[in-house]
Amino acid sequence: MREGGDRFHVATSVSDHVVDVRAVGEIDIATVGALRAALWAAPARPVLRLDLSGVRLLSAAGVRALVAAHLRVRARGGELVLVDPDPVVARVLRATGLHRVLPVRESAHDPAGDSARELCAAA
């Protein structure tokens, strides 16, 4: 499944235990609706993994969407995990303290995420 426009798009894949969402582009007030729609449409699974490696900008609207998605996923008994944020996005996660609320991991080329390393260590 793919959603979005020219500046931003989202692709989703679903397996038995994990939903993978890959976002590419800029997450700002104009594009956050597409991200929110993809996260809300994700079926309930133990893990919702959001790949941020292709995201160049994360605005306050994007941060709010991540917090809301975290609360929604947690209420359903799951976990939202952020994967491979771009250095600019990782800085936003640290500056907002979101890295202390959500797990932020590096995929380390492990499709299952079992050997994922923690990123955004507390500074």
Image (cartoon, rainbow, N blue to C red):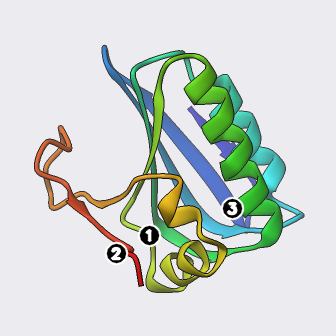
Snapshot quadrant of residue 68: top right
The relative height of residue 68 versus residue 97 in the rendered view (above or below) is: above
Query: In the image, which disc is placed on residue 113?
Result: none
Q: Marks 3 and 1: in contact by CB < 8 Å?
A: no
The relative height of residue 4 versus residue 56 in the rendered view (above or below) is: above
- The front one of 116 and 110 is 116
Which quarter shows the C terminus?
bottom left
Q: Quick one: label 3, few (<14), some, or many (20+) residues within 10 Å?
A: many
Q: CA distance from mark 3 to mark 2?
A: 28 Å
The relative height of residue 24 versus residue 45 in the rendered view (above or below) is: below
Q: CA distance from mark 1 to mark 3?
A: 15 Å
> Which kind of residue does numbered mark 2 sit on?
Ala
Left or right, residue 97 beside residue 22: right
Give the residue drawn at x 39%, y 74%. Answer: 120
Q: Secondary structure at mark 1?
A: loop
**Which residue is tagged 1?**
85
> Which kind of residue does numbered mark 1 sit on?
Pro
Query: In the image, which disc is placed on residue 121?
Result: 2
Q: Marks 2 and 3: in contact by CB < 8 Å?
A: no
- The front one of 9 and 33 is 33
**Which residue is tagged 3?**
8
Q: Secondary structure at mark 2?
A: loop
